[in-house]
Amino acid sequence: MINRRAWLGDVGRMGLWGASASSWPFLSACAPWPIGSTSALPRRTPEQLGMASSAIHRFVDAVGQQGFELHGFVLMRHGQVAAEGWWKPYGPQYVHSLYSMSKSFTSTAVGLAVAEKRLSVDDRVVSFFPDDLPAQVSPNLAAMRLRDLLTMATGHETEPTWNMVRSPHWVRHFLAAPVSRPPGKHFVYSSAATYMCSAIMQKVTGQRTVDYLRPRLFDPLGIAQAHWEVSPQGIDVGGWGLYLQTESMARFGQLYLQDGRWQGQQLLPSDWVRQATAPQILTTRPAQARRPDDRNDWMQGYGYQFWRSTNDGFRGDGAYGQFTIVLPKQSAVLAIHAECRDMQGVLDLVWQHLLAGMKDEPLAADGAAHARLVDALQALSLPMPQGASRSARAREVSGRRYRLEPNPLGLDWLSPTFADESAQLVLTGPTAQHSLQVGLGAWWRGHTALPGTPPRLSPGGAPPAGTAHLYMGAGAWTSPTRFEMMMRFVETAHHDRLTLQFDADEVHLTFKGSLVAIGAQAHEERPVLRGRAAA
């Protein structure tokens, strides 16, 4: 095996960059690391870090061939970035929703509080909330420990989160839910359990979890951009709702790979790292699982808000492919942002191409293969609506005002405008006007507070109504009378597809969020808006 310390020392003497800064595929030109990071990670060619550029190229090609939608990735080996790329219009400068990848950060906050002796994983959950307990505290609820929250072994028969987020007081709802089994023995995945960890953190520290983590984790790691959604009680939701840049996730994974040390400082006790990433409890086999357990990355055990992985690794992960994968034997970290329902399929490609391409020693330089990889990474993009930038109908309808039929979104008027390089749709209600602008053949940046956007898997922690969300938009005429708008909410995993159908003096506007497109059961489709041209 390679001497990691000697290798890092040799690479360090070679200078910060293994290639010119311009050869790395950042969307922010001239920026040697993502906007928002306070210090640069060293970067090397894959060959210098024991990987073939061609192996990474094959991974990227396979992602496209299998139809997986990745938004960005950062691959590290031996503490240095080997490759990174973002599919336009996503980029390194944007934070991105982590979904349940957030849980691993909540666990880290608990570990820091344990180290500060503010609490213990054996503390009883009911002890933190004497004013929120049900009239009758069952023996199983009384026995529930913080450890049981961390390992998803609360004793609940079913996941309580969906009902919890619809209740006026989340902590009280959680404590009132029946605990039918003795805690600590049976795994039931529960985002509500992680929320309770965050609520406990706020009880013992007097701070939101994100604020507690800033000086202890985010600032030392060089993570300048981080925000967390909150419950109606102002508590970080814990089990989801954290937003970070892709590289920030990689830094977090590197901290865990290094047993909690960062730049010579022990940020997180190594004992906590080992406990959190060890298999604390066996996971339960889903009824629909078809592959053998030894090839199922959700059947390798669960730690403190970390999943064990095949290939003797561990990871934090979130819905639709938000991954921070740590492979200790290979000294590797991979951070991924995505919108992909087949998360196991993405992991299979990681094992097939990236893991298989990791060697114990540096490889001979391969300038041609590296140049091809850099070109491929710079060219990464997601498709825009396909069609024409012009239509004879555009001249007829541009600037017209359409009176909308009564609708649940409370919108009264619709007015489209078509120009040479862009299109604009204005939707007006009694108290607000929403202007959506998209490029024709290019992504245009905008913000919108249109009701129902961006698509969300859960209503829990949603920002207040009227909050404007960043999007990148593109459009095209997909037929002579149909105009399609794609709005990618680049700080989330999801996108919206709006279609305007013009027939004589009428217009129909339909919405199709990507959650509906990939079969999310929780998401409701929005109504079709119908309007007639004003006289």
Image (spheres, rainbow, N blue to C red):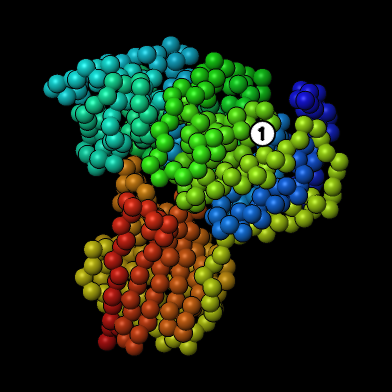
Quarter in which the N terminus is drawn: top right
Asked whether the viewer can see residue 231, the reply is yes
Q: Report the residue that reaches farthest toward the left.
A: 135
Residue occupying image coordinates x 36% and y 75%: 415
- Compare residues 35 and 386 and report the one nearer the observer: 386
Q: Residue under circle 1?
A: 332
Give coordinates of residue 61: x percent, y percent: 66, 56
Q: In the visual, does 273 lie left or right of 198?
A: right
Mark 1 packing: few (<14 Cα in 10 Å), some, or many (20+)? many
Give coordinates of residue 535: x percent, y percent: 27, 87
Residue occupying image coordinates x 54% and y 73%: 386
In this picture, is 226 found above or below 382?
Answer: above
Q: Secondary structure at mark 1?
A: strand
Q: In the visual, does 218 lie left or right of 118?
A: right
Q: Amino acid at mark 1?
A: Ala
Residue occupying image coordinates x 48% and y 88%: 392
- Compare residues 303 and 7 and report the one nearer the observer: 303
Q: How many marks?
A: 1
Give the quadrant of residue 194.
Answer: top left
Give coordinates of residue 475: x percent, y percent: 50, 71
Q: Report the residue that reaches farthest toward the top.
A: 117
In this picture, is 56 found above or below 316?
Answer: below
Asked whether the viewer can see residue 225, the reply is no
In this picture, is 491 found above or below 249?
Answer: below
Give the quadrant of residue 222.
Answer: top right
Residue occupying image coordinates x 21% and y 38%: 168
In this picture, is 308 found above or below 518?
Answer: above
Give coordinates of residue 224: x percent, y percent: 55, 36
